[in-house]
Image (tube, rainbow, N blue to C red):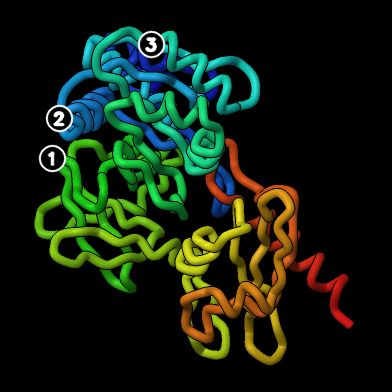
Amino acid sequence: MNYARLVDEGLAAVDAALSGRARGIAVRTSGSTGEPREALLSADAVVASATATLERLGGPGHWLLTLPADRIAGAMVAARARVGDTDLVHGDRGPFTAAGFASAAARMPDGRRYVSLVPTQLRRVLADPRGADALAAFDAVLVGGAPPGMTLPPNAVETYGMTETSGGCVYDGVPLDGASIRIGEGGRIMIAGPMLADGFADGDDSAFVERDGQRWLRTGDVGEITDGLLTVRGRGDDVILTGGVNVHPATVERALLAQPGIADAVVVGVADVQWGQRVVAAVVPTPDAVVTLEGLRDGLPLERAELPTAVVVVDSVPRTAAGKIDRYAARAITARITAEEAP
């Protein structure tokens, strides 16, 4: 029995897996750090993830689908509705807007309501009064795919996970029931549990390792666990080495997004002869905001090495189809602009 491919069949692939007509689903990874691969998720893994999520949130509820169905986040929204035997309401067609979100939310049945959003969507909704009112009526708003970089509303749950873990498996820093986390060599986050993928379609399963008789996924992310809570610092291969100091882009991005006048931001390392790499920020200002390097450096509560040495203003932060920052594209943009602006 084969894995149904999300990229070909969309929500029909989820239905095939959960009805027993397919072994599971084959899901493309985000591709934010290289070429996308397909992770093979068994139906049991999908059900385990969906069940644990519903238990954490307080029981089954109706779900609003605002994410692409050919990616793990959207697929798991459908799976949670199916496992909970509740309604799946589709968002409006076309680009995501706060007005469309509010319109779709109004079509949801009575009862518990859930939705999963990426940070960009959440920011758009909160910036619109009608969207914000609609959002407040949800019992839980799962926010994942990237660091939120904002103060979350009371009903929001910050999630951490990936395609290989059937989506989010750590909610507000605490693993879902059945999931385990640990910090491995080099600070890499490791995850175990019934929601892990069987492997990859290309046969390279080196990311999965055995530790103490248990199968773990060694992620590409670095973090730390304090009092049982996981803090994600960012991807290990995104670390910027500047003047011998390791700088995590996600730390700088969170600080930038907390500043007035910044609607979105990405931080990357640009090659530098003297320092090895420079910390460069690409920012999207809010309407009428004026962003300067001096103003940002004065206002950011960061260590000296973490402060951007250059800032470029862009219309939008490049992102993958799953809503994650496309750092390859961001590096290319910042490197080109800083080179053009150099004396």
Q: Which class describes the residues within 10 Å of circle 3: few (<14), some (14-19), or many (20+)?
A: some
Dot 1 or dot 3, earlier in sequence: 3
Residue type indicated by callout 1: Asp
Residue under label 1, please give it.
177
Q: What residue appears at the point 37 percent right and 17 percent down from the top-left corner?
A: 14
- Marks 2 and 3, Cα distance to the nearest angstrom? 21 Å
Residue under label 2, please give it.
55
**Which mark identifies residue 108?**
3
Dot 1 or dot 2, earlier in sequence: 2
Q: What residue appears at the point 61 percent right and 45 percent down from the top-left corner?
A: 319
- Furthest-left residue in this view: 213
Look at the picture and state if 153 lies above or below 329: above
Secondary element at tag 2: helix
Q: Which class describes the residues within 10 Å of circle 2: few (<14), some (14-19), or many (20+)?
A: few
Look at the picture and state if 261 lies above or below 185: above
Residue depth check, mark 2 versus mark 3: number of the one nearer the observer: 3
